[in-house]
Image: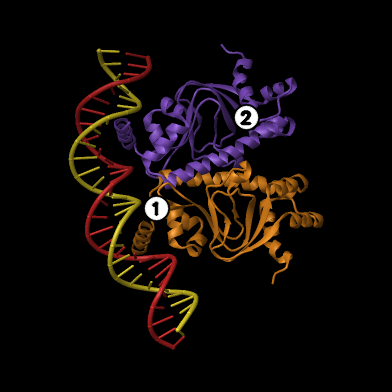
Chain colours: A orange, B purple, C yellow, D red
Amino acid sequence: MYSAKTLFQPFFDYIKTKSSISLTDEEMIMVMDNYKIKHLRKRQYLLQEGDVCKYMAFIAKGAGRMYRINEHGQDSVIRLAVESWWLGDFESYNLGTPSKYNIEMTEDSDVLLISRESSQELIRNVPAIAQMINEIDKSGTIATQRRLQSAISLGAEERYQELSDLYPEFIRRFPQSMIASYLGISAETLSRIRKNLLRSK
Amino acid sequence: MYSAKTLFQPFFDYIKTKSSISLTDEEMIMVMDNYKIKHLRKRQYLLQEGDVCKYMAFIAKGAGRMYRINEHGQDSVIRLAVESWWLGDFESYNLGTPSKYNIEMTEDSDVLLISRESSQELIRNVPAIAQMINEIDKSGTIATQRRLQSAISLGAEERYQELSDLYPEFIRRFPQSMIASYLGISAETLSRIRKNLLRSK
DNA sequence: CGATTCTTTGAAAACAGTCAATCTGTGTGG
DNA sequence: CCACACAGATTGACTGTTTTCAAAGAATCG
C-alpha cells in the first residue's frame, strides 16, 4: 500500500525540473488537493473514443499509449508515455469536444489526474505550477514540430534510429507493434529494419 | 505608399478573431510601438539557417514558407503561411539557439515583427494580446498534432485531399513543388496524384 | 521573344505494405 | 511440471506505392 505522499513524490520532483520556483508546504497541499490519484491496471482505459477528455494524466508510475482507429481500420499511435510524461487529448480537453482517441495503459500504473478547472485554479495560485505548464507547452510544441519534420522528411529506418537515440526507454518498454504504429510503419517493416541494423553494426 | 494605420488594420482585425477583449486606443498605440513593420520582396529571407530567430512575423500581406535542408540535401517545407498567419522558428525564438530553418517570402509581403521582449511586455500590459497568444498556442498545438496524425497514418493522396479541403488557398498560391515538400512527397508524385483526381471527378 | 523556373511524363528501381505461415516466449490451467 | 493457448515477432512471396532520373512540355517574367 502506498501513501499519497509517496505517489506525489515523482510529481514534485518533476515540477522541480520544469520550474525555477519551488513549492511552499501550503502549495504542496494545494497541489495534492487538486490532483486525483488513480490506479490503473495494464490494459485499462483512461479515455475512450467519443468521450470528452476531462483530465490530463501525469504518469507517476507505469506506461500508456494514446491511439486512434484510422480510416483504414488500423490503430495509429499518436503518443507513447512512461513515468513523468503526460497523457491526454489536448484538443478534447481544451475544447470540450468528443475525443477521437483512446488512451490505454500498457503497464500497471499510478496516474495523477487534473481537470481543466483545477488546473486553472492552480495556475492562478501557484507560480511554480504556472511556470511548469508554460514550460510543458513550449517544449511540447517544439517536440511535436520535430517529430512532424521527421515524419515528412525521413525514411522509416532513419525515424526508428532517431527514436532509439532519443527515447531508448520506449524501445524497451513498448511492444514493437506499438513502436511501428507510432512511427507510421507496419510491424513487419519494423521487424525487417531491426534485422538490418543488427547485421550492419 | 502605405500608412502605418493601413498596415496594422489586418492585425487589429486578427486580434478580434482571437480574443474576446477589445483594444483601447492607448493599447493600440502600445501595440504599434512594439511591432516593427517590414516590407519584403519575393524571394527575400526573413531568417537563414544558423541565425537566431529574433522575431515572430505576422503576415499582414503576402506569403512565405519555412523550410530546411534535410540530410539528403533536399528542401523540406515545415510551414506555409499567407495573410493572418505567423512565421518564425518557435524553437530558436524561445530558446535562443541557432535555427535549422530558412524563412523565405514567396510573394512581396508586409510583415509585423515582434521580439520576445516586446511580446512579453505586451502580454503583461494588454489583456487582449495575452488572450490572443494563448489562443494561438492552443490552436497551433492542435493543428500540428492533427498534421502529425495525418502524416503518419494517411497515404499521399489522402494528405493532399485533406490539405485542399482545409486550406485551398495554399494550393492556389504556392508552387506545387512547395506543396509536395510540405506534404512530404516528391513533386512528381504530386503531379501524378493531381492527374488522378482530375480523371476521377 | 528568350531565359528561367515549374510541371508533366515515362521507365526503372527502391521502398513499404499485405497476407499467410511459422517461430518464440509467456503465462495458465490441468 | 507439462501441455496448451495466446500474443508478439519474424520470414517469405507478392503487390502496390513512391522515388529517382532524364527528358520534354508549359508557364512566367524581364
Q: Quadrant of the C terminus of chain A?
A: bottom left
Residue beneath disc 2? B114
| In the depicted structure, whether residue A142 falls above or below residue B121 | below
Which class describes the residues within 10 Å of circle 2: few (<14), some (14-19), or many (20+)? Answer: many
- Mark sitting on residue A185: 1
Residue A95 place in picture, x, y as percent = 61, 41
Q: Is residue B98 visible?
A: no
Judged left or right of residue A167, residue A13 is: right
Residue A61 place in picture, x, y as percent = 62, 63
- Element under disc 1: loop
Judged left or right of residue A106, residue B106 is: left
Residue A170 place in picture, x, y as percent = 50, 60
The amino acid type, in three-letter code, at marker 1 is Ile
Q: Chain of mark 1?
A: A
Judged left or right of residue B162, residue A52 is: right
Q: CA distance from mark 2 to mark 1?
A: 40 Å
The image quadrant of residue A181 is bottom left
Could you tell me which residue is drawn at 65 percent across and 32 percent down? B132
| In the depicted structure, whether residue B110 falls above or below residue B92 | above
Q: Is residue B129 visible?
A: yes
Contact between labelled residues 1 and 2, with CB atoms less than 8 Å apart: no
Residue nearest the observer in this picture, A102 or B186: A102
Judged left or right of residue A48, residue D30 is: left
The image quadrant of residue D4 is bottom left
Q: Chain of mark 2?
A: B
